[in-house]
Image (spheres, helix red, strand yellow):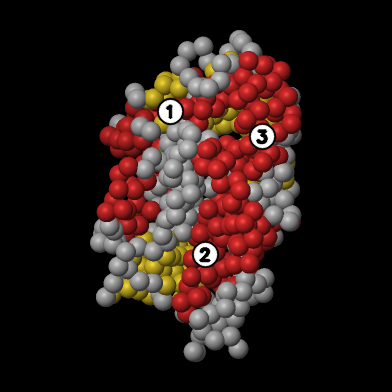
Amino acid sequence: MTPRRGKIVIIGGGVAGLCAGVYGRSCGYETEVLEQHSAPGGLATSWTRGAYTFETCIHWLVGSSPGEMLNAQWREVFDIDRLSFVYAEEYQRVESEGGPSLRVYSNVDRMEAEFLHVAPEDAEEIKAFTSAIRVLADLPLQDAMNGPWPRRAWAMLRLAPRLPLLQHWAGISAADYGKRFRHELLRRFFGDSGTAGMSVIALVFMFAWMNRRNAGYPVGGSKAIVDLIVERFRALDGTLRTGAKVEEITVENDVATGVLLESGETIAADWVISAADGHAAIHELLGGRYRNAAIDRLYAEQPVFPSYVQVSLGVAQDMNGEPGHLAYIPREPFRVDPETALTIVTFRTFNYDPTFAPKGKTAITCFLPTYNFAYWVELQRTDPAGYATEKLRLAETVIALLDRRLPGLRGRVETVDVSTPATVIRFTRNWKGSMEGFLPTPGSLFASRRQTLPGLGRLLRVGQWVSPGGGLPTGLMTARAAIQSICRQDDVPFLPTLRPVTFDHAA
């Protein structure tokens, strides 16, 4: 009979929290995941409106290719072979209203050929960028950061000769890099987005993964992944509670002892893992007692990903000939809110996911980044009618923009849904309504963040607020590292397994 190894309570049922739950159960711990929303997933979410499904998270899953390290780790938490992946030939199309367009291919050779064809005047910079993708394509970065010691040592040896190249690209923002190009669409592609402040190395890695076919889109979107992780967790007899909002992390003698729910229920635990919003965990759940100057400086100075308004449309039209990801430059700036006017608007046309709409119809989303989250929260709180009017205005503006590009589309719109930063904050409590977490700006991408808090024992943090860049792989890797740390401190083997573990509750 398996001995009792203690209980882990996990705050937050997003990907990081669910992965931590699977790893905890696999290693023999009684594990309970608490999710405030009515369904797990957190920011990795999709929802249905009538016959249509709309997605707000996943564009690709790093680790989709068998044989890659992240693929092996995903297998530890769910059956990745049950997913079907789509590898788009065209990553994005950049198009100006009534003007030229630029195809950005996922394959680096095709990308280079297209860029050189449309912008021979930028040949030197184009070749420098595509060369970096090729050189860093097989970089064992995850092995160097999270692999077992022999593999990590070998990865560091392979990494060393390429450190100068890494440092070069990591030190440039996408906004500054875009200024190097003379061709307008190339300049706009690199430098004109809500995340233009991030390091351009993030784009290099993104295209390196795509070029290796290690970043495919899973059919079914976020929900397909979350459902499989939940299935694994429950097969291991883990406990997932939805509608369970944590009010406080309980502490005795500077040691986390469990959580207090909004309902008044107290749950005792040997370990607490916070997969919740980082700012809320530190300042609300712990009352700001366990922080230092470095943490305060991080939250005061480090930029975060923007929040967003998303306009989602269900359209009674087959759009198989349209680009799946379109960056569209309208003739006039697109006003999102009083502080936000966009000169480029992005659309996702889900013609590559047959589960999102009935046959012959298409789900489309328009992503509108904004840092003016407070406007939306306050408008929803103080003027519900005005809030509804603003949402309707944005939906009408998006439909008008698409109708100019595809005449007649307006008459085929069957479903309209609008979410705002207020929606994001209400469902996830994510700080500033951020879509991911800390932005990986130049100089911050490889910065290590502790998963502990100063002066507090038996608590670990996982997820996108631990490491700049966020994303699903961060949730997986930080969850794995947290359970490894717990096992090490409890002198328990870290042995991820697919077999359910039975508790001896009498122990």
The structure residue drawn at horizontal position 61% and vertical position 10%, both measured from the top left corner, is 98
Q: CA distance from mark 3 to mark 1?
A: 44 Å
Number of the front mark, 3 or 1: 3
Please tell me the numbered disc located at residue 481: 2
Q: What residue type is disc 3 on?
A: Ser
The structure residue drawn at horizontal position 36% and vertical position 43%, both measured from the top left corner, is 302
Q: Position of residue 239 (x, y in %)?
A: 52, 69
Q: How many marks?
A: 3
Within 10 angstroms of label 3, few (less than 14), some, or many (20 or more) residues? Answer: some
Local secondary structure at mark 1: helix
Q: Position of residue 231 (x, y in %)?
A: 63, 62
| Label 2 or label 3, whichever comes before in sequence order | 3
| Label 2 or label 1, whichever comes before in sequence order | 1
Q: Position of residue 118 (x, y in %)?
A: 68, 16
- Above or below 229: residue 332: above
Within 10 angstroms of label 1, few (less than 14), some, or many (20 or more) residues? Answer: some
Q: Position of residue 274 (x, y in %)?
A: 42, 61
> Residue 49 or 33: which is nearer the viewer?
33
Number of the front mark, 2 or 1: 2
Q: What residue type is disc 1 on?
A: Lys
Please tell me the numbered disc located at residue 131: 3
- Asked where in the image residue 235 lies, by quadrant, the reply is bottom right
Q: Is residue 32 visible?
A: yes
In this figure, which residue is indicated by the disc labeled 1?
391
The structure residue drawn at horizontal position 42% and vertical position 72%, both measured from the top left corner, is 271
In the image, taking residue 381 as reference, residue 307 lies left or right, namely right
Q: CA distance from mark 2 to mark 3?
A: 33 Å
